Amino acid sequence: MNQTKSASPGMTGSVISFPERGPWGDSKWRGNASGHVYRSLFEQVRPQVFVDPMVGSGTSVEVAREMGIEAYGLDLHQGFNAVSMDILNHVGKPADLVISHPPYGGMIKYTGPGGMWGDKADPGDLSHCADDAEFHEKMQMVLLNQRRATRPGGYYGTLIGDWRRGGVYTSYQAEMIARMPANELAAVIIKTQHNCVSDTKTYGAMKLPRILHEYLLIWEKRSVSAVVLLSTLVKEQGARVSGTWKNIVRLVLQGLGGRATLDKLYAAIAAAAPERLAENHHWREKVRQTLQLHTDLFRNEARGLWAVA
Ligand SMILES: C[S@@+](CC[C@H](N)C(=O)[O-])C[C@H]1O[C@@H](n2cnc3c(N)ncnc32)[C@H](O)[C@@H]1O
């Protein structure tokens, strides 16, 4: 067992495993991370200035300071909300590395009865989001905030796990990767999870494997301009949406035997996704636009009659 401050098993590849948390931070702070994770990351990236905007019991900052790194720890329990408050303004200078360790959705509640701190649930507490959609949107804001606080060429990232409960599996890391600039993703590191609460639960005859890993996601801040960032994100999200339309129209048309009238196609698409479509009044135009745009995939055989090309 290694509890010394100096030794760290290191990061030799994209799968890391640190069974001991080390002496840093507070082992009683629920959801705390092993200090070795931070130590091995610092050894790899060698930051001069480090920020953790959700520092919890202080694990990351203790490790950083011990290594001579200028480190700043912020947290909602000090009154700093990483969703709504500017990290860069708070720290006063850009950092080489900004790593957060957010709640995993509502798996552990940090405020409110039975939480880690605060008697009342704090509306800013990310462990109290109404649903996954709210959490994903807020975490995108946190990551963009971290990115702004990072110097160009520096790194920002997050440590997060997946959550399965009541038949729902949420992969927070996948949602985050999808919402951040694809050309900045620099590393996806799998961290073996040790001593998690679920280890002690009985899983009976569960069909699928228990989650025993977390992710350390790292992005490199490449562009400086907010306009470039916005246009990159809009272009990426737009390409994803139009790709999805293309695939859905093709799938439905194939299901109709490879040829159908527009009316039949509309009816089949509406039957497949009625709720989502009800929110979008222009979806029929979108279907027509998709058919007309992708001449390599769709052929117009007669007025209102379409086939797979
Ligand atoms: C998983 S814990 C971090 C544990 C830390 N790495 C450690 O080793 O002790 C998540 C932290 O996020 C904080 N938090 C929740 N919502 C926040 C927000 N909106 N802004 C900043 N911190 C927040 C919680 O107070 C909690 O301390």
Image (tube, rainbow, N blue to C red):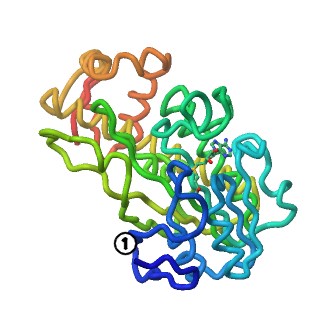
Image label count: 1
Is the residue at mark 1 in contact range of ligand 1, meaning its CB lies under 8 Å from it?
no
Q: Is residue 254 above or below residue 228?
A: above
Amino acid found under the numbered disc labelled 1? Val
Q: Position of residue 225 (x, y in %)?
A: 76, 60
Q: Residue at x 35, y 16 (%)?
A: 274
Q: Quadrant of the N terminus?
A: bottom left
- Write down the residue under mark 1: 15
Q: Residue at x 39, y 28 (%)?
A: 287
Other residues around mark 1 within 10 Å, as few (<14) / some (14–19) / many (≥20): some
Q: Can you give x and y, in whole percent of width and height, for residue 270 in the image?
A: 32, 18
| x 25%, y 49%: residue | 210
Viewer-nearest residue: 127 or 56: 56
Local SS, label 1: strand
134 displayed left or right of 61: left
Residue at the spot 40% in from the left edge and 79% down from the top edge: 13
Query: Where the C terminus falls, by quadrant?
Result: top left
Q: Quadrant of residue 19?
A: bottom left
> Who is closer to the viewer here, 96 or 185?
96
Percent from the top left, x then y, of residue 111?
A: 62, 34
Image location (x, y in percent) of residue 243: 40, 44
Q: Is residue 13 left or right of residue 138?
A: left
238 relative position to 57: left or right = left
Decide if residue 143 is on the left or right side of residue 32.
right
